[in-house]
Image (spheres, grey):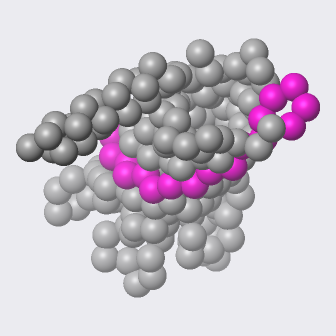
Amino acid sequence: MKKLLLSFGAALLFVAAAQAQTTYGLKAGVNLGKFSNYGDQSNNTSFYVTGFADLPVAPQFSIQPGVSLQGKGTKFVDSWGDVANADISTNIMSIEIPVNAVYYVPAGSGNIFLGAGPYVGFNVSGKEKATGNLGDFSGETDYDLKFSGDDKDFNAIDAGVNFLAGYKFNNGLLLNAGYGLGLTNLVPNADQTVSNRVLSFGLGFQF
């Protein structure tokens, strides 16, 4: 019983120490998105905003859970003889929950950081915009994407792995770069798995 109480007390002290050292941060920047297995594409430019907590678990090593608003998608040309020739952009807004493991390496007036971890995302809105010739229509049109129902355009759940790198100055300023590797299929009933591929750059601050 005494050992159990001592172990419980040690666990409480560990949690209290971790909470005392926990810091919080905010990052924002530019996303360059594409889809895997989606033909000839170009980057779809969007944005991201991420709030996170940094929980130290060992010297120079932290776990960073967070919540993120992520703009994703792609751009491509739909061409089919004289019937269709249009530039199409697909824009999807997702709320993500990442949990990253981050390692810090002291360098100069701060730390280089490297990290990776899983994420799960919930696609909450989207729009597809076409400019050009689409059969009987010529000009510009847009369409609200559906994420539920039998006729949905994309699946609502997205999951994958994040990779991140950057530099944290001693004053808390962050320079960030990252890559999101989607592992789930975005398109219902697709012959191949269509997943997100997102390169990101941004700035942040850790308090």
Q: Is residue 202 above or below residue 74?
A: above
Q: Residue at x 57, y 54 (%)?
A: 116
Q: Quadrant of the C terminus?
A: top right
* Quadrant including the N terminus: top left
Q: Residue lying at the far right in this picture: please name it.
A: 108
Residue 109 sits inside the magenta stretch: yes
Q: Tell me the quarter of the picture where residue 96 sits.
A: top left
Residue numbers of the magenta segment: 107-124
Image coords of residue 167 (percent x, y): 78, 35
Magenta-drawn stretch contains 121: yes
Q: Nearer the viewer, residue 92 or 114?
A: 114
Q: Estimate the x, y position of residue 174 in percent, counting from the top left.
A: 72, 27
Front-most of residues 132 and 142: 142
Q: Main secondary structure of the magenta part?
A: strand
In the rendered image, residue 135, in percent from the top left (x then y), is placed at: 51, 63
Image check: 185 left or right of 51?
A: left
Q: Could you tell me how many numbered marks the image carries?
A: 0
Q: Which residue shows up at 65% across the image and 47% down it?
A: 103
User: Residue 91: in sight, yes or no?
Assistant: no
Res 74 → quadrant: bottom right
Residue at the location (61% across, 27% down)?
27
- Residue 80 in view: yes
Q: Is residue 144 above or below residue 169?
A: below
| Outermost residue toward the front in this view | 2
> What residue is drawn where x is 71% and y is 58%?
42
Q: Looking at this rendering, what residue extends furthest in the left direction?
A: 1
Q: Is residue 38 left or right of residue 203?
A: left
